[in-house]
Image (cartoon, rainbow, N blue to C red):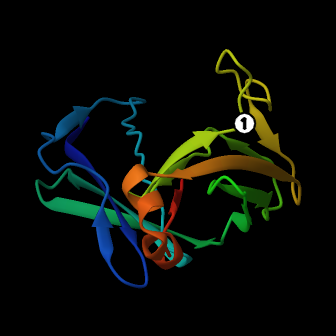
Amino acid sequence: PVQSVSIKADLQTNLQRIPLTTQNKAPIMLDVDETLSDVIQHEVKDLGTHILVCEVTYMSNYNTLASFRKFFKFEVLKPLDVKTKFCNAESDDVFLEAQVQNTTSGPIILEQVALESSHQFTVKSLNEINDGVSVFGDITLLQPQESCQYLYCLTPKENVIKDIKMILAAKNIGKLD
């Protein structure tokens, strides 16, 4: 058996080193043919070169602490390209069309595309059928280079409608997430 086995994983980016495993796990003993695994989830937001650093520490047969590391280098590229168009209606509403394109070499599933409006507007998604079902079906699967278009209606809040200067000065209508 191997004594005091522990696993540590860090993600190294150009800007920082992010610990991915919790340090409070107690070291364990592994018998012959026994394995130790850990599932790690982390949302990668920075583009560029990343290195996943995995380190295993254990007590050797000579009662000394030993360890080894493996490095997994990978590139994080921009997976989606988003283009937006605005259309002002006579009713003071603003329609936002967002075109989301898969720029990767593999398919991507879009779990959710939503517009969070700024404090000056209320937003209504025009991408659902009456009963809340997406017009794209249960799953939005984008093949490489495919795109999908989303439509939202932004209505200025009452206090904004009364002050035309506020409407004209509104630079931030919301955030597409």
Position above or below: 2 against 67: above
Position in image of residue 17 (x %, y %): 31, 74
Q: Residue at x 73, y 24 (%)?
A: 138
Q: Residue furthest top?
A: 131
Q: Residue furthest front?
A: 162
Q: Residue furthest bottom?
A: 14
Q: For the image shown, how many numbered marks are present on the structure?
A: 1
Q: Helix or strand or loop: what does disc 1 sit on?
A: loop
Position in image of residue 140 (x %, y %): 76, 37
Question: Looking at the image, which is closer to me, 119 or 9?
Answer: 119
Image quadrant for the N terminus? Answer: top left
- Dot 1 crowding, Cα within 10 Å, few <14, some 14–19, many 20+: some
Position above or below: 112 against 133: below
Specify the quadrant of the image occupied by residue 29.
Answer: top left
Name the residue tied to disc 1: 127
Q: Residue at x 41, y 39 (%)?
A: 39
Specify the quadrant of the image occupied by residue 33.
Answer: top left
Question: Looking at the image, which is closer to me, 70 or 53?
Answer: 53
Position in image of residue 36 (x %, y %): 36, 36
Q: Is residue 73 left or right of residue 55?
A: right
Q: Residue at x 88, y 54 (%)?
A: 146
Question: Looking at the image, which is closer to me, 16 or 129?
Answer: 129
Position in image of residue 104 (x %, y %): 78, 62
Position above or below: 46 against 151: below
Q: Which amino acid type corresponds to the residue marked 1 in the rendered image? A: Asn
Q: Is residue 23 left or right of residue 169?
A: left
Q: Residue at x 19, y 36 (%)?
A: 28
